Amino acid sequence: MRESDKRFVDQFREMERRMGRMFRNMAVPRMGDPLYSGTWVPAADVYETEEAIHVYVDTVGIDPKDLVVTAERNSVTVAGSRRVPDRANIRCVHQLEIEHGSFTRTISFSVPVNVSATTSRCANGLLEILLPKEKKQDRVAVKITT
C-alpha cells in the first residue's frame, strides 16, 4: 500500500473511532439523570493467538470485586458495576463523560475455547481474560471392540 493510501486509511479509521464515541455519548440512556446514566458498555480489545483468545476490558474505577466473568465455549461475558463517586458540595458540572452503573458485555468468537482453563486478572484498570483454545486432535486412535 502506498504511503498516501495508508495515511488516508489511518485518518478514516480515526474519524470512524471518534464518530462512534460521539454517537455512543449521545445515546438515550445518557439523556436521563446525569448522575445515574443507566446501562453502558466498557471498551474491549480481543486478540487471537495460536494458543488462546485474549480479551482486555477497560475497568478503570471498578472494584474487581464488582466484576463477574463467565466463560462459555464460544463467548465470554463480563458483568459489573461502576459506582458513582461521592459528589457532595458540587456547585457546577462542567463535563460528564465517565459512564456509571451496571453493565454486561458479551464477546463472541469463532473458535471454541477450553472453559475450565480460562483465567482472568484485573490490574491498573484493565481486566485481562485468557481463554485457551480447545486442542484440535488431527488423529485419534480408535479401539475396535469385538
Image (spheres, rainbow, N blue to C red):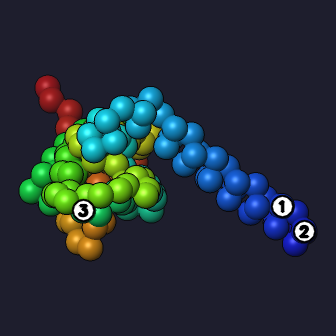
Callout 2 crowding tier (Cα within 10 Å): few <14, some 14–19, many ≥20: few
Residue hosting label 2: 4
Quadrant in which the C terminus appears: top left
Circle 3 or circle 2, nearest the eye? 3
Res. 61 mark: 3
Q: Confirm whether residue 134 shows in the render.
A: no
Q: Looking at the image, which residue is at 16% across and 47% down?
A: 68
The x and y percentages for residue 111 are 41, 43
Number of marks in picture: 3
Q: Looking at the image, which residue is at 49% across and 43% down?
A: 25
Q: Nearer the viewer, residue 12 or 50?
A: 12
Dots 3, 1 in contact, CB < 8 A: no
Dots 2, 1 in contact, CB < 8 A: yes
Write down the quadrant of residue 61 in the picture: bottom left
Q: Nearer the viewer, residue 6 or 24?
A: 24
For marks 3 and 1, the one nearer the N-term is 1
Q: Confirm whether residue 93 shows in the render.
A: yes
Spatial CA distance of label 3 from label 2 is 40 Å
Residue hosting label 1: 8
Spatial CA distance of label 2 from label 1 is 6 Å
The x and y percentages for residue 36 are 26, 40
Q: Looking at the image, which residue is at 35% across and 56% down?
A: 92
Give left or right: position of 22 versus 102.
right
Give left or right: position of 124 versus 107.
left
Circle 3 or circle 1, nearest the eye? 3
Dots 3, 2 in contact, CB < 8 A: no
